[in-house]
Amino acid sequence: MVKGLFLAADLHWALVCLIGIAVVFVGLVIIIGLVELMNLIATKAEGKMKTSDTIATQSKPVATPAISGVIENRDEIVAAVCAAVAEENGTDISAIRVVSFKKI
């Protein structure tokens, strides 16, 4: 009689473990499904926003300085780039010498 009691207890714990593992995997599948659904919704919303931005951009005239290659606020941009390079190299900004600066 004692032998049968231990066998039933062992099956009980095995069943609990299997049900626990199944619940975890079902939960993960549900989470993956929700993430994919949110991705689909965000992609469609982004596509609509890009379409409306494209329509708004096409209706506005293009500024001539962007076409001609003239850099507005050139001195400020050069100063910002020099400060970033000096910070990255760990040197003083006076050690940086700009030879040329072109709009690409």
Image (cartoon, helix red, strand yellow):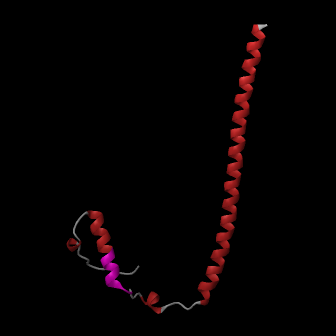
Q: Which residue is outermost to the left?
A: 95
Does residue 76 belong to the magenta stretch?
yes
At x 20%, y 74%, the residue is 94
Residue 76 lies left or right of residue 55; in this view the side is left
- List x then y, in percent, for residue 27: 70, 44
Instruction: Name the dominant secondary structure of the magenta segment.
Output: helix
Above/below status of 17 relative to 55: above
Residue 88 image-quadrant placement: bottom left
Q: Which residues are magenta?
A: 72-80
- List x then y, in percent, for residue 11: 75, 21
Above/below status of 33 relative to 12: below
| Quadrant housing the N terminus | top right
- List x then y, in percent, for residue 24: 68, 39
At x 66%, y 78%, the residue is 51
Residue 52 image-quadrant placement: bottom right
At x 69%, y 64%, the residue is 41
Above/below status of 23 relative to 14: below
Does residue 68 belong to the magenta stretch?
no
Residue 26 lies left or right of residue 104; in this view the side is right
> Count of labels shown?
0
Tell which of 71 and 79 is nearer to you: 79
Above/below status of 42 relative to 67: above
Residue 46 image-quadrant placement: bottom right
| Quadrant housing the C terminus | bottom left
At x 29%, y 73%, the residue is 82
- List x then y, in percent, for residue 19: 74, 33
